[in-house]
Amino acid sequence: MTVKRGPKNPEPQEWLSSELSQNYVADYKPFNFVDGEGVRCSLYVSGCLFACPGCYNRIAQNFKYGKATQPSSRIRLWLI
Ligand code: SF4
């Protein structure tokens, strides 16, 4: 028997980045054409608890996937 699972649906304030984040960044694209209209930069932070069926990026659900970074300061440098 297959159990159909939907994504997890937290209450507001239930999942706090201040408690969950391990300060890892999965990827950064300075010029991105695929995440919407126009040209943009995209920063992909690591870690996700939603568990969507058919997740397109299961590896990045791990909060320690990618590169370790410092909160805010390193990310600010990447964006310059
Ligand atoms: S990373 Fe996967 S599980 Fe998380 S929101 Fe995106 S599709 Fe859903």
Image: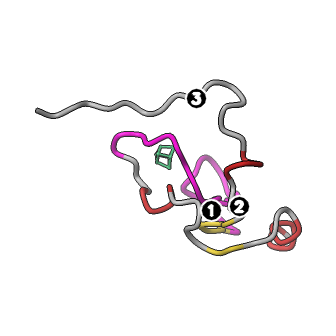
The prevailing secondary structure element of the residues shown in magenta is loop
Query: For the point 87% across and 66% down, which residue is it?
Result: 76
In space, the residues marked 1 and 3 are separated at their CA atoms by 30 Å
| Quarter of the figure that contains the N terminus | top left
Percent position of residue 80, x then y: 87, 71
Front-most of residues 23 and 31: 23
- Local crowd size for mark 1, using a 10 Å CA cut-off: few (<14), some (14–19), many (≥20): some
Furthest residue toward front: 19
Choose the circle earlier in sequence order: 2 or 3. 3
| Kind of residue at badge 1 | Asn
Choose the circle earlier in sequence order: 1 or 3. 3
**7, above or below 58, in the image:** above
Disc 2 secondary structure class: strand
Percent position of residue 16, x then y: 72, 41
Percent position of residue 69, x then y: 75, 72
In space, the residues marked 2 and 3 are separated at their CA atoms by 28 Å
Label pair 2/3, CB-CB below 8 angstroms:
no
Percent position of residue 44, x then y: 63, 59
Q: Mark on residue 32? A: 1
| Kind of residue at badge 2 | Cys
In space, the residues marked 2 and 1 are separated at their CA atoms by 6 Å
Q: Mark on residue 10? A: 3
**54, above or below 8, in the image:** below
Choose the circle earlier in sequence order: 2 or 1. 1
| Kind of residue at badge 3 | Pro
- Local crowd size for mark 2, using a 10 Å CA cut-off: few (<14), some (14–19), many (≥20): few
Q: Which residues are magenta?
A: 30-54
Query: For the point 83% across and 72% down, which residue is it?
Result: 74
Label pair 2/1, CB-CB below 8 angstroms:
yes
Q: Mark on residue 41? A: 2
Numbered disc in front, either 2 or 3: 3
Is 44 positioned to the left or the right of 62 in the image?
right
